[in-house]
Structures are given as structure tokens and as C-alpha cells.
Image (tube, helix red, strand yellow):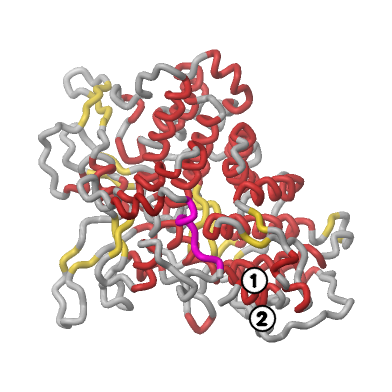
Amino acid sequence: MKIKNIYKIMAVLALPLMGVGGLTSCTKSDSELVSFVEDNRLNTPNDTVYSLMGIVGKMQVVADRTILLGELRGDLTSLTEQASLDLQRIANFEADASSPYNNARDYYALIQNCNYFLANADLDLTKRGYRVFEREYAVVKTYRAWAYLQLALNYGSVPFFTEPILKEKDADPSLYDHYDVKQIANFFIDDIKPYVNTEYPDYGSIGGMASRRFYIPVRVLLGDLCLWAERYAEAAKYYHDFLTLQSNPRPVGSASIGWMNREFDMLIDSYSAQFTSSSEILTIIPMETREYDGIISRLNDVFNSTEKNNYYYQATHSPAYDELSRSQRYVGIFNDPATMLPDTLPVPEDKVYVSEAMRGDLRQYSVYPPLRSVPSASSSYSTLRQTCNKYRSGNVSLYRLQYVYLRFAEALNRANYPQAAFAVLKYGLWKDNIEKYISAEEREKAGELLSFSEYYFTRENTFGLHSRGCGRSDGDKQYVIPESETKEDSILAVEDMICDEMALETAAEGVRYYDLMRIAQHRNDPTFLAAKVARRKGANNFDNALYTKLSNTKNWYLPLE
């Protein structure tokens, strides 16, 4: 496939329509390179629903690969012997033009539809005093920015255009500049910033799902773009403003898994439930439930034992993830039965566990419960069954609330506020903690970035992210910023802790590889990513060949052919 063939799909105007009772779309064939009539404006209210849901249909096409490309190339997931050759090639950085997961055309088809909508939506059309298309316009702007960001993260430098390609002569690759991730980020920061306060449309329930959950929050995407553009203070502001929006404040919440008592012999888990219908999920790509209706997600069959894969799961937690999780220290705070006063207790070092997955941070145990052994009457079925609780739903999650907090910490730290960033991990940002654990000097410099309403962010709903799997991190005297000679050293140390927390919180969710890319970019050090990925088989199985390969950033990307 030559690069001009990617433009073939760009040159096709694929204006999708929503199928009856579903989210399927119909498009013109690739061979229909046509010039369109002048009367191609979108100017009726029905156009808004059909066109926007058609673009959501284009998101379905890229959903699974977005997750797999971001997860399998990281350090937290290992493939089993049953994994397909295509998945193995992704994990080994060997995917070529023949890979079904290496198809830039599908992202460009999404962009083409967005460009067409943005070029033809009649923004002057009003009804009852408001502009009919303005809300959809904002949504489509974010979809386009997100799609271009995915292209840059996966291909490095990509052809860039913002007008729909309607004629074959306009599909000449030489007509377009190539943009890398920083150029794309800087362009779309300016492009979507005017819509930061635009309310998104609400179509109620579509296909049994709330339509509002299909959209990418503008402030969150702006924060991401600013992080990639290394505009850290701006990134922190967008994340902060999203979290503290007066009309919809978003405290951390109370989802966690932990030991119930001071004997450390009983667990309570509210953590795994967040990956289905929890309000912590901010954005989903809604997938069909039946192949007859359109595109379904196959992620469940990759990460879980299902009847479709004869119970042979293809991906599981890596030795590197095991080592990180089990190296964490769990600390609980329980009432002393003699005094009835709070008593801080770490899990005893000599504790014997039913499963090693219970050692250290418990989030892995919640996400990947121990394998089940199931007798089978058929020799073609695996008797070892895996459950990954992050893929019990048939939809694909793009954003969770915890991503925002982690990236907020990342931005604060790089903006020279390491104490505030660390407080996100250990304490939680509510009034008393901000005043107690962040110096007056840093609070003054950070200003509004540390403004959290004492009415909405309280002791009951705001605690450190590390506590989601490690008990009461605020009581752990060993979980601290290491002693450093300079503030720059402190920033690097806190960034290492944030990177580890990202792993513990977001493993298997398709963001890890990009997190490693971004932190390596912050440090101008490609070996940061290379060393993490080369160690995914465990500290004693370092892959020197892979390390050497990934020390060259040219090898981070898929071939754009």
C-alpha cells in the first residue's frame, strides 16, 4: 500500500447515516471519487443527529486498535502462546503494512467525515434563539483533534489537512504538509479552545446508552494537547478547571480495594465495578452488541477467556507489572481494640497470601482475579480461565476520571509544583490537605490551580490515588518524595512516582505506551521508554535488543506506507 492509497480513502466523501436502532453507518465505496453538487450543506436539525452518529460510527472502526496499539507496545501486558501473529507483531514492534492494525486510512476516514461536517454545517441556522449546529460542531472538533493526535502518536509525522477532499486531484500527497505530535497539539489547542464552554448535545439514550458519554470533554482534550505541546501550566489549568467546574465538580470518589481489618485476612472491593457503568468513565466509544448490526469490540476475547476463543485468553499482566504491583507497601488505618484510637499498620512482611496477587497494591488483584481452573469435556477448550474486569463491557472506554487526575499531577509537577503533584497521589486535594502538605510558597505560585471548593471536595470523597490499592497512603511514612539536592531532582523523582501510579491505575487500558512516550519526551530521553519496555518480561529478563531498537525514536512508530 503506497501513501497515495491512504489518500484514496481521504478523497472519498463518506458521510455516514445512523442505522435504525443502532450505530451502524453506510458509506460510499472507495472507488467513488466524485465531485459533489453545490447543495451539500447540512441545514436541517435531523442532519445533526445523523451526521454526528455517523462520525461516532467511524470511531467504532478504530476503537479496538487504539487500545491495542497503546497497550501491547508498553510494559504492563504480555501475550500468551495463543495470541494471534498480528498481536505478536504489534508487541514486538514488527507490524508492517499488511497488519490489520496498521491502517491509517481509517483514522483519515474519520477525519474526512469531520472535515466535511465542519465545512458544511450551517452555523447560521438558528432555532428558538440558539444555533442548531453549534453543540455538534464542538463535538466534531474534538473528534477531529483526537483522531489527528492518534495518528501522530502511532505514525510520528502525518499528512495534515483540515478541508474535506472531494476530488481525486486533491488527493495528491505532495499538496500537504506533514505534522508531528507537537505541531498537531499546538494547532488543535487553538482550534478547540473557543468551545471550552460550549454545552454538548444530549440525544437521550441511543442503543441503550446515554449519548452524552460518547463525547470527549473539551477541557480534558485541551489538557492532553498541552501536555504533548509541553505547555504544562496550561495543561494543569484545563485539567483543574474540568475537575472543579461548578456545574459538575468531580472529586476522586471512593472506589478502592483494601483489607477490611487489622488482621489483613478479608478484602473489600469497590474498585472493579468502575469499569462498567461507573460515573468514573467519562468517554466511551459505543460498540454494537451483534455483528449483524455492525462493529463489535473484540477486546473481551483478547483479555478474557470466552467461548469465542475456546477460553484461551491472548493477553495478560506482564512480569514487570507483577513486580511493580507487589513491590508496593500496603498500609491500613484501623481502630486499636484496646484504645479505640486510629492505629496505622502496614501488612506484615511475613504474611502468607492465598495468592501472590494480593501482595502489595491490590488493584491488580481486582482487575485480574486469580486464574480459575475449570474441568472441560472438550480437549479444544482451555481449562485455565482468565477474567480481566476492565473488559466486561462491550464498549470501549477512552477516558476515565483517574486519567485526568494523573495527568493533572503530571502537568503540575512539570509546571514546577512537585509537592502539589505528589499530594494528588498521597493525600488528595481538598482544603485541609492543600494547606497542610503543600508549602505556602508553592501554594502562592500555583494560585488558582490549587483552588478546590471545600463544599464539593471533602475528606469523605477526596483521597490520594495511591490509596485506591494501597490502603491509606496518607498514613504511610515511607511513601514520600525522596530527598533531593535540587528541585529539578524532586520533579524527576515525583515524575517516576506518577509514572508508577499510572501503571498501577491504568494497566490494560491502552494508554501506557503513550504515557511512556510523553514522559520520555518531557525528559528528552528516549531510553526512558526503551528501558521500561525492554524490562516487561521482568527485571531479570531485560531485552537488550529491544532496548537498543527503542532507543531510536524512529522505531517507536508504525510504518506509514
Residue at mark 1 = 109
Of residues 238 and 202, the one nearer the viewer is 238
Distance of label 1 from label 2 (alpha carbons): 10 Å
Task: Give left or right: position of 96 versus 215.
Answer: left
Mark 1 residue crowding within 10 angstroms, few (<14) / some (14–19) / many (20+):
many
Does the magenta-highlighted stretch encompass residue 559? yes
Does the magenta-highlighted stretch encompass residue 73? no
Task: Give left or right: position of 272 versus 3.
Answer: left
Of residues 246 and 189, the one nearer the viewer is 189
**What amino acid does circle 1 point to?**
Ala
Task: Indicate the quadrant containing the N terminus: top left, top right, bottom left or bottom right.
Answer: bottom right
Report x, y in % for residue 40.
84, 75
**What amino acid does circle 2 point to?**
Thr
Q: Residue at x 40, y 52 (%)?
A: 550
Image quadrant assignment for residue 325: top left
Q: Which residues are magenta?
A: 553-560
Residue at mark 2 = 27
Report x, y in % for residue 78.
30, 59
Say which mark, if any, is on residue 63. Answer: none
Report x, y in % for residue 354.
13, 48
